[in-house]
Image: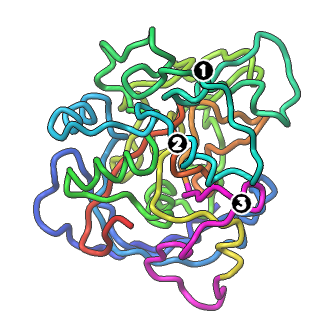
């Protein structure tokens, strides 16, 4: 399939910041109207973005540790839970959970060892007290020896705090998709029309029987260190798969449907507010890129056009981020 992307060969503004690559501006087709796409990925439409610098990898444990040690920052998953604040994002009358549950923690992939129906993610996700970026699977786990792994269990404000400290920002949804599509915006995958060209795995996603049997045919039965897979043509690593990544856009399922298809959308920053009809009490941002848990049997979100809504106070085992830098926007 031919690309429908046009690059505007903007010269990089000076020398590359450490660990970042230049993404030249251009126009591309954002979204997907294909059979493999979810409804909220469409309608596909033309978008133009200015050039920007982007981290070549997801932010790593080592990089996040440097930020925490410099600032004393405490992530959302490490903070005591305030029930009065929490219930503002819940339906009226929601009963208070047991005190043993209302402890700092995060969501961890906890698969069964047998087949389950795929319409209930609580079958393979569990709230684990003590899980956070330092202890990704619970208090007995550690990131020792994993400096070059992507930091996870990062809520939206945790990512913004790091980006502000680093003099960067989070990418918009449009910027992320432009960079991930790798000048192939007419193709379903970042590298072309085939998921595994010539039998080769180019990203970290789920193989096996989801969720209970992961075979790791791509080389990793779990999160991979950064730079484990080939970079795309811009020099970006794992922009598809491995861990989901935050963008700065608020989530609405009808974002694309509200746009004028006859007009090129220039440097979009998303809707002014969040609304998810399936969970209207929780403000959500868009995450992109998919993760090592994306499976052809379940979600197939290892596609650049895929988008998912995630509550801004949510940290998860398969959720991280990378930053961008430009003169165009500031963090919301």
Label 2 crowd bin: few (<14), some (14–19), many (20+), radius 10 Å: many
Vertical arrangement, residue 265 with respect to residue 119, above or below: below
Secondary structure beneath dot 2 equals strand
Label 1 crowd bin: few (<14), some (14–19), many (20+), radius 10 Å: few
Q: Position of residue 280 (x, y in %)?
A: 71, 60
State which tag comes first along the sequence, 2 or 1. Answer: 1
Image mark count? 3
Q: Mark yes or no: residue 307 visible.
A: no
Separation (CA) of disc 2 from disc 1: 29 Å
Q: How is the image coloured?
A: rainbow
Q: Position of residue 33 (x, y in %)?
A: 75, 66
Vertical arrangement, residue 25 with respect to residue 266, above or below: above
State which tag comes first along the sequence, 3 or 1. Answer: 1
**Marker disc for residue 208:** none
Q: Residue at x 45, y 24 (%)?
A: 224
Quadrant for the C terminus in the image: bottom left
Vertical arrangement, residue 168 with respect to residue 51, above or below: above
Q: Which residue is mark 3?
A: 280
Secondary structure beneath dot 3 equals loop
Separation (CA) of disc 3 from disc 2: 22 Å
- Select label 3 or label 1 by which is in front: 1
Q: Residue at x 41, y 34 (%)?
A: 79
Is 112 magenta? The answer is no
Q: Quadrant of residue 30?
A: bottom right
Indicate left or right for 156 with 110 as reference: left
In magenta, the rendered stretch is 259-286
Q: Mark yes or no: residue 80 visible.
A: yes
Q: Which residue is mark 2?
A: 244
Q: Which residue is mark 1?
A: 100
């Amino acid at each position: 399939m031919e690309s429908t992307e046009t690059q505007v060969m903007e010269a990089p503004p000076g020398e590359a910041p450490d660990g970042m690559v230049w993404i030249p501006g251009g126009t591309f087709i954002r979204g997907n109207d294909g059979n493999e796409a979810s409804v909220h990925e469409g309608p596909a439409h033309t978008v133009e973005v200015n050039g920007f610098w982007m981290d070549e990898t997801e932010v790593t444990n080592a990089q996040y540790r440097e930020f925490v040690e410099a600032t004393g920052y405490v992530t959302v998953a490490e903070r005591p839970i305030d029930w009065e604040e929490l219930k503002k994002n819940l339906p009226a009358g929601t009963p208070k959970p047991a005190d043993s549950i209302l402890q700092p923690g995060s969501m961890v992939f906890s698969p069964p060892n047998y087949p389950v129906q795929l319409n209930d993610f609580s079958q393979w996700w569990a709230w684990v007290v003590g899980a956070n970026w330092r202890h990704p699977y619970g208090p007995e786990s550690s990131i020792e020896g994993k400096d070059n792994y992507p930091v996870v269990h990062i809520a939206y404000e945790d990512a913004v705090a790091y980006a502000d400290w680093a003099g960067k920002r989070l990418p918009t949804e449009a910027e992320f998709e432009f960079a991930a599509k790798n000048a192939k915006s007419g193709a379903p995958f970042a590298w072309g029309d085939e998921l595994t060209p010539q039998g080769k795995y180019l990203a970290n996603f789920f193989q096996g029987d989801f969720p209970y049997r992961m075979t790791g045919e791509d080389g990793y039965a779990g999160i991979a260190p950064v730079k484990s897979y080939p970079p795309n043509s811009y020099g970006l690593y794992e922009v598809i798969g491995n861990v989901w990544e935050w963008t700065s856009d608020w989530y609405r399922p009808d974002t694309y449907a509200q746009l004028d298809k006859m007009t090129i959308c220039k440097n979009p920053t998303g809707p002014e507010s969040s609304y998810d009809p399936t969970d209207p009490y929780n403000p959500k941002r868009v995450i992109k890129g998919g993760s090592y848990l994306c499976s052809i049997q379940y979600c197939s979100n290892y596609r650049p056009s895929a988008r998912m809504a995630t509550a801004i106070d949510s940290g998860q085992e398969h959720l991280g981020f990378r930053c961008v830098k430009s003169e165009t926007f500031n963090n919301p």
